[in-house]
Image (tube, rainbow, N blue to C red):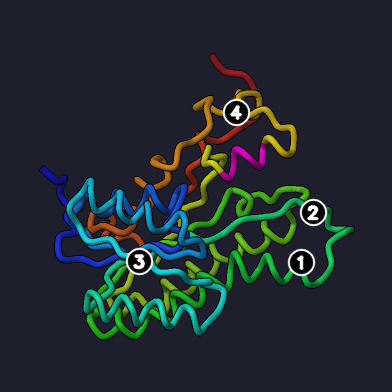
Amino acid sequence: MIAEGYDFTGKVAIVTGGGTGIGAATALLLARYGADVAIAGRSESTLAPTAQAIENETGRRCIWIRADVSLEAEVEAMVARVIAEFGRIDVLVNGVGWGDHAKLSDMDLAAWRFEFARNLDTGFLCTQAVGPHMRAQHSGTIVNVSSVAGNDGVQGLAAYSVAKAGIQMFTRVAAAEWGRHGIRINCVAPGLIATDNATKDFVANNIEVDTFCANYPIPRAGRAEDVARAIVFFASEASSYITGETLTVAGGPIVGGTGG
C-alpha cells in the first residue's frame, strides 16, 4: 500500500545524474511508487544496468538517455525523447553536480566557469526545457539538488559552493514565477552522503569519514536513500503546499555549547 500523497501511477519522471548515487536511488524510489522514469547522464556503463535493475525490481518502465546536460542541444534532445516515449513529463530531478577541490588563489576562469556549467547551468537548462510541457498540462514538480556547501560554503570548493548557492536562489525565484502555472520547484541540500564517488573523494583527500561525522547529531554519513526520500517528498503531492524551499539533509546542525 502506497502512503497518501505518494502515488506516482501514471506519472513520468526525469532524473539527471540517474546512473549512480543519489540519482539512481531517487529513480528507484519513484518507480517503486508507480512512476515511469527516464534516467540521464554521460555514462552508458552506469545508466544501462541501473535502468534494467529498476525495471526488474519495480515492473515500471525505465529508459536511459546518454546526455551531457550542460549542453543545451543535448538537453533538448533528452526532453524530446521522453515526450516521444511517454507523452508527458510530471517530475524533473536536477541531480547532476560535483565539485573539484581547488584553492581560490589557484583557480583560473575556465575552471570557475566549468563548476558553474556543471552545477548551475545544468539545472537551468533542464528546467527551461521541461517548462513548456509542464505549463501546458498546468502541473509538474521540479527538485534541484544543491549541497550544504551552498548553505555555508567550503574552503577549497569556492566555485562549487557559489554555484550550489545559486541553484538554491534559482529554485526560489523559479518557484515564484512558475507557481501560477501549477508547477512547484524545491531543492534539497545534502551533506556528506556516502556514495561511491564521495567515498573515493574522501579517500583521495585523506579524510576519515567516521571522524568527520562524529560531531553530527546523527553521527554517521548519509546514505543515497536518505536524500532520495527527501527528493521524492518534494516531488509528491505530500508536499503540495510547499514551493521555493531548500531542505538540508545532513544529519543535523552542529552548534556550540554543551548539552546532555
Q: Does the magenta segment cover residue 19? A: no
In this figure, which residue is indicated by the disc labeled 4?
213
In this figure, which residue is indicated by the disc labeled 1?
111
The label on residue 99 is none
Q: How many labels does the image show?
A: 4
Q: Does the magenta segment cover residue 200? A: yes
Q: Reading the chain from its start, which is encountered first: label 3 or label 4?
A: 3
In this figure, which residue is indicated by the disc labeled 2?
102
Q: Outermost residue, right direction?
A: 105
**Observer-nearest of 199 and 256:** 199
* Secondary structure type for disc 2: loop
Q: Is residue 244 visible?
A: no
Q: Distance between the residues labelled 3 and 4?
A: 32 Å
* Residue range (magenta): 197-202
Q: Distance between the residues labelled 3 and 1?
A: 28 Å
Q: State the quadrant of the N terminus.
A: top left
Amino acid marked by disc 1: Ala
Query: Which quarter of the picture shows residue 259?
Result: top right
In this figure, which residue is indicated by the disc labeled 3?
14
Q: How far apart are marks 2 and 1 (CA)?
A: 9 Å
